[in-house]
Amino acid sequence: MEGAPVNLQVCRSKAGRAIQLNAGAGASDSAWLWFVHADSRVTPATLLAMQQFVSADEATIGYFRLRFLADGPRATLLNAWGAQFRSRVLGLPFGDQGLLMPRRVFDALGGFDETVSAGEDHDLVWSARARGIPLRAVNAPILTSARKYAERGWWRTTCQHLGMTREQARTFSQRHDRRNSVESN
C-alpha cells in the first residue's frame, strides 16, 4: 500500500451528515464507495481486506470489526464487543464500522435519507435489510476514537448510545416495514 497513489477530492455541501455523505458519493465516479468516519483509522490489514472484498464484486454492504483507539477508557473494549454482537448477530452494523458498498447498491437504496436527523447510517442498514441486500463482515479492524467516552464518561455515553440505538431501531424498522408493504402492493 505504501507509495500507492491517492486520489483525493474535496467537496463542499450544506450541513447535515446525510447531505454531506450523499454529496461525497455524488462527487465520486467510483464504482465502489467506502464511508469512513473522520476520526477512524485504517491499518494495512484493513486496506487489504477492503481490496479483497471489492474484488469479489458482490451486491452487498461490507463492514469492518470496530476497535477503539487508546484515547478513551479501557471499558470501550465492551463497546467494541457490543458492536460486533450487534453487527454479526442482529445484522446492524453502523457507520463507525466503515460501510463499504458498490455504487449500484448505494444507488438502489437511494443514498442516505436526508430527512433523518440522526442515525442516517443505521437507517441505510435498515433499508438494505428491508430490500434483501446482504450485510457482510469484512474480517479486518477499523479503529475509531474513544475520545467521547473519555470526555462525556463511559457509562453515560454508553447508555445514551444504547437508548438512541433502541429508539432508532424501532423507528427505522417500522418505517422500512411500511415502505416494503407499500412497494409490494
Image: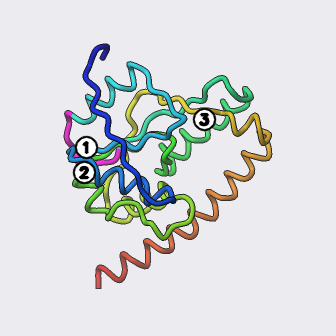
Quarter of the figure that contains the N terminus:
top left
The residue singled out by tag 1 in the image is: 32
Residue located 36% across and 55% down the image: 23
Report the number of discs.
Answer: 3
Q: How is the image coloured?
A: rainbow
Q: In the figure, 86 relative to 3: above or below?
A: below
Front residue (pair 31, 8): 8
- Residues tagged 1 and 2 counted as in contact (Cβ below 8 A): yes
Q: Give the x, y percent position of residue 134.
A: 33, 51
Q: In the figure, 42 relative to 35: above or below?
A: above
Q: Amino acid at mark 1?
A: Trp
Q: Earlier in the sequence, mark 1 or mark 3?
A: 1
Which residues are the magenta region? 55-61
For label 2, count other residues whose C-alpha is less than 10 Å away and answer few (under 14), some (14-19) or many (20+). Answer: many
Residue located 32% across and 51% down the image: 25
What distance separates the C-alpha of mark 1 from that of mark 2? 5 Å
The residue singled out by tag 2 in the image is: 103
Q: Is residue 162 left or right of residue 55?
A: right
Element on which disc 3 rests: helix
Front residue (pair 31, 86): 31
Residue located 31% across and 14% down the image: 2
Q: Earlier in the sequence, mark 1 or mark 2?
A: 1
Q: Is residue 161 left or right of residue 125?
A: right
Quarter of the figure that contains the C terminus:
bottom left
Q: Residue furthest top?
A: 2
For label 1, count other residues whose C-alpha is less than 10 Å away and answer few (under 14), some (14-19) or many (20+). Answer: some
Q: Amino acid at mark 3?
A: Trp
The residue singled out by tag 3 in the image is: 81
Element on which disc 1 rests: strand
